[in-house]
Image (cartoon, rainbow, N blue to C red):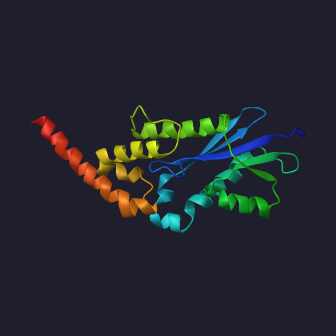
Amino acid sequence: MNTESKTIEIDDSGTGDLVGDAFIGFHITETGHLLFKAIPVKLYNEENLRKGAPKKKILEVVREGLEELNYNKEIDKVKLCRGDCFDMVRIYFEDKNINYEPSIIDGVLQTAVEGKLVTHLRNLGVRSKKLSIDSGVERYFILFNWVCRDFPKREKYVKTGFKKWKTVWRERAIENYNKYKIIKRNRRY
Protein backbone atom coordinates (compact mmCIF):
# COMPACT_ATOMS: atom_id res chain seq x y z
CA MET A 1 0.00 0.00 0.00
CA ASN A 2 1.36 3.41 -1.01
CA THR A 3 1.49 5.75 1.97
CA GLU A 4 3.14 8.70 0.24
CA SER A 5 0.78 11.61 -0.09
CA LYS A 6 0.39 13.57 -3.28
CA THR A 7 -1.09 16.88 -4.37
CA ILE A 8 -3.45 16.82 -7.33
CA GLU A 9 -4.17 20.09 -9.10
CA ILE A 10 -7.32 20.37 -11.24
CA ASP A 11 -7.88 23.11 -13.83
CA ASP A 12 -9.99 23.76 -16.92
CA SER A 13 -9.51 25.28 -20.34
CA GLY A 14 -11.99 26.16 -23.05
CA THR A 15 -15.06 26.28 -20.82
CA GLY A 16 -15.55 29.94 -21.71
CA ASP A 17 -14.11 29.87 -25.22
CA LEU A 18 -16.41 30.23 -28.20
CA VAL A 19 -15.16 27.25 -30.17
CA GLY A 20 -14.34 23.61 -29.51
CA ASP A 21 -14.32 21.13 -26.70
CA ALA A 22 -13.34 22.13 -23.18
CA PHE A 23 -10.70 20.26 -21.19
CA ILE A 24 -10.16 19.36 -17.56
CA GLY A 25 -6.54 18.82 -16.61
CA PHE A 26 -5.06 17.01 -13.63
CA HIS A 27 -1.48 17.33 -12.39
CA ILE A 28 0.29 15.41 -9.65
CA THR A 29 2.76 18.01 -8.49
CA GLU A 30 5.21 15.57 -6.92
CA THR A 31 5.67 13.47 -10.09
CA GLY A 32 4.67 15.88 -12.87
CA HIS A 33 2.09 13.37 -14.17
CA LEU A 34 -0.59 15.01 -16.33
CA LEU A 35 -4.02 13.72 -17.30
CA PHE A 36 -6.64 15.38 -19.53
CA LYS A 37 -10.34 14.79 -20.04
CA ALA A 38 -12.46 16.36 -22.79
CA ILE A 39 -15.87 17.99 -22.37
CA PRO A 40 -17.54 17.82 -25.82
CA VAL A 41 -18.66 21.05 -27.48
CA LYS A 42 -22.16 19.58 -28.01
CA LEU A 43 -22.74 19.87 -24.25
CA TYR A 44 -22.61 23.65 -24.67
CA ASN A 45 -25.72 24.00 -26.83
CA GLU A 46 -28.70 25.87 -25.39
CA GLU A 47 -30.66 22.85 -24.17
CA ASN A 48 -27.68 21.13 -22.58
CA LEU A 49 -26.52 24.33 -20.87
CA ARG A 50 -30.01 24.82 -19.45
CA LYS A 51 -29.84 21.29 -18.00
CA GLY A 52 -26.36 21.89 -16.55
CA ALA A 53 -24.84 19.19 -18.78
CA PRO A 54 -21.31 20.67 -18.92
CA LYS A 55 -21.03 20.92 -15.13
CA LYS A 56 -22.42 17.38 -14.75
CA LYS A 57 -19.87 16.07 -17.24
CA ILE A 58 -17.09 17.98 -15.47
CA LEU A 59 -18.10 16.34 -12.18
CA GLU A 60 -18.06 12.94 -13.92
CA VAL A 61 -14.59 13.44 -15.40
CA VAL A 62 -13.18 14.80 -12.12
CA ARG A 63 -14.40 11.68 -10.34
CA GLU A 64 -12.89 9.50 -13.10
CA GLY A 65 -9.64 11.44 -13.05
CA LEU A 66 -9.20 11.15 -9.29
CA GLU A 67 -9.86 7.43 -9.52
CA GLU A 68 -7.33 7.00 -12.34
CA LEU A 69 -4.77 8.93 -10.30
CA ASN A 70 -5.42 6.69 -7.26
CA TYR A 71 -6.57 9.58 -5.12
CA ASN A 72 -6.49 8.65 -1.43
CA LYS A 73 -8.93 10.74 0.59
CA GLU A 74 -7.00 10.07 3.80
CA ILE A 75 -3.62 11.49 2.75
CA ASP A 76 -3.84 13.29 -0.61
CA LYS A 77 -4.52 16.96 -1.18
CA VAL A 78 -6.58 18.48 -4.01
CA LYS A 79 -6.11 22.01 -5.33
CA LEU A 80 -9.18 22.93 -7.37
CA CYS A 81 -9.45 25.89 -9.73
CA ARG A 82 -11.90 28.52 -8.49
CA GLY A 83 -13.84 28.67 -11.77
CA ASP A 84 -17.62 28.31 -11.71
CA CYS A 85 -17.42 25.32 -14.07
CA PHE A 86 -16.42 23.39 -10.92
CA ASP A 87 -19.52 24.34 -8.87
CA MET A 88 -20.88 20.77 -8.83
CA VAL A 89 -17.43 19.40 -8.06
CA ARG A 90 -17.19 21.60 -4.97
CA ILE A 91 -20.62 20.40 -3.79
CA TYR A 92 -19.57 16.80 -4.39
CA PHE A 93 -16.29 17.31 -2.51
CA GLU A 94 -18.13 18.82 0.45
CA ASP A 95 -20.75 16.03 0.46
CA LYS A 96 -18.00 13.38 0.42
CA ASN A 97 -15.78 15.24 2.91
CA ILE A 98 -13.00 15.50 0.36
CA ASN A 99 -10.45 17.99 1.57
CA TYR A 100 -9.68 20.47 -1.21
CA GLU A 101 -8.23 23.91 -1.48
CA PRO A 102 -9.78 26.50 -3.84
CA SER A 103 -6.78 27.63 -5.85
CA ILE A 104 -5.52 29.82 -8.63
CA ILE A 105 -3.82 27.27 -10.85
CA ASP A 106 -0.80 28.47 -12.78
CA GLY A 107 2.47 27.01 -13.90
CA VAL A 108 2.76 23.48 -15.31
CA LEU A 109 -0.92 22.50 -15.29
CA GLN A 110 -2.27 25.80 -16.55
CA THR A 111 0.19 25.86 -19.43
CA ALA A 112 -0.47 22.19 -20.26
CA VAL A 113 -4.28 22.32 -20.19
CA GLU A 114 -4.36 25.52 -22.26
CA GLY A 115 -1.89 23.88 -24.65
CA LYS A 116 -4.26 20.91 -24.95
CA LEU A 117 -7.03 23.31 -25.98
CA VAL A 118 -4.83 25.07 -28.55
CA THR A 119 -3.83 21.72 -30.06
CA HIS A 120 -7.52 20.79 -30.29
CA LEU A 121 -8.36 24.10 -31.97
CA ARG A 122 -5.51 23.62 -34.45
CA ASN A 123 -6.88 20.15 -35.23
CA LEU A 124 -10.26 21.75 -35.99
CA GLY A 125 -8.49 23.96 -38.54
CA VAL A 126 -7.76 27.22 -36.69
CA ARG A 127 -4.55 28.41 -38.38
CA SER A 128 -4.03 31.90 -36.94
CA LYS A 129 -0.44 32.44 -35.86
CA LYS A 130 -1.79 34.63 -33.05
CA LEU A 131 -3.69 31.74 -31.42
CA SER A 132 -2.01 31.16 -28.07
CA ILE A 133 -2.52 29.59 -24.67
CA ASP A 134 -3.60 32.99 -23.34
CA SER A 135 -7.37 33.11 -22.97
CA GLY A 136 -9.29 36.33 -23.32
CA VAL A 137 -10.54 38.82 -25.86
CA GLU A 138 -7.82 38.25 -28.46
CA ARG A 139 -8.44 34.48 -28.53
CA TYR A 140 -12.19 35.07 -28.67
CA PHE A 141 -11.89 37.16 -31.83
CA ILE A 142 -9.41 34.78 -33.44
CA LEU A 143 -11.99 32.01 -32.98
CA PHE A 144 -14.93 34.21 -33.96
CA ASN A 145 -13.22 35.29 -37.19
CA TRP A 146 -12.34 31.68 -37.96
CA VAL A 147 -16.01 30.72 -37.64
CA CYS A 148 -17.07 33.67 -39.84
CA ARG A 149 -14.83 32.65 -42.75
CA ASP A 150 -16.79 29.44 -43.31
CA PHE A 151 -19.85 29.87 -41.12
CA PRO A 152 -22.05 27.07 -42.57
CA LYS A 153 -19.36 24.46 -41.96
CA ARG A 154 -17.94 25.82 -38.72
CA GLU A 155 -20.95 26.72 -36.60
CA LYS A 156 -21.03 23.10 -35.41
CA TYR A 157 -17.83 23.85 -33.46
CA VAL A 158 -19.39 26.83 -31.62
CA LYS A 159 -20.70 26.70 -28.06
CA THR A 160 -24.09 27.87 -29.32
CA GLY A 161 -25.74 27.88 -25.92
CA PHE A 162 -23.84 30.95 -24.77
CA LYS A 163 -26.42 33.72 -24.45
CA LYS A 164 -24.44 36.33 -26.41
CA TRP A 165 -23.96 33.91 -29.32
CA LYS A 166 -27.70 33.79 -29.87
CA THR A 167 -28.43 37.46 -29.19
CA VAL A 168 -25.42 39.18 -30.81
CA TRP A 169 -22.58 37.15 -32.23
CA ARG A 170 -24.37 34.64 -34.46
CA GLU A 171 -25.93 37.40 -36.55
CA ARG A 172 -22.58 39.21 -36.79
CA ALA A 173 -20.92 35.95 -37.85
CA ILE A 174 -23.43 35.52 -40.67
CA GLU A 175 -22.93 39.15 -41.78
CA ASN A 176 -19.15 38.71 -41.78
CA TYR A 177 -19.43 35.42 -43.66
CA ASN A 178 -21.48 37.12 -46.36
CA LYS A 179 -18.85 39.90 -46.62
CA TYR A 180 -16.07 37.31 -46.93
CA LYS A 181 -18.00 35.58 -49.74
CA ILE A 182 -18.29 38.85 -51.67
CA ILE A 183 -14.60 39.65 -51.20
CA LYS A 184 -13.61 36.14 -52.27
CA ARG A 185 -15.88 36.28 -55.34
CA ASN A 186 -14.47 39.70 -56.35
CA ARG A 187 -10.90 38.40 -56.07
CA ARG A 188 -11.65 35.74 -58.67
CA TYR A 189 -12.61 38.35 -61.29
**Does 51 sit left or right of 86 as displayed?**
left
Q: Nearer the viewer, residue 188 or 61?
A: 188
Q: Residue, x 52% and y 41% (percent of image)?
A: 117
Q: Nearer the viewer, residue 111 or 44?
A: 111
Q: Position of residue 32 (x, y in %)?
A: 72, 32
Q: Position of residue 176 (x, y in %)?
A: 27, 50
Q: Residue, x 45% and y 63% (percent of image)?
A: 163
Establish if 11 lies above or below 129: below
Q: Residue, x 69% and y 46% (percent of image)?
A: 104
Quadrant in which the C terminus is drawn? top left
Splitting the image into 4 quarters, where does residue 168 fall? bottom left
Q: Position of residue 120 (x, y in %)?
A: 49, 40
Quadrant in which the N terminus is drawn? top right
Can residue 20 be seen at all in this image of the molecule? yes
Q: Position of residue 103 (x, y in %)?
A: 72, 48
Q: Residue, x 71% and y 34% (percent of image)?
A: 33
Residue, far left? 189
Can residue 69 be seen at all in this image of the molecule? no
**Count of all numbered marks drawn on residues in the image:** 0
Residue, far front? 137
**Does 106 sit left or right of 180 as displayed?**
right
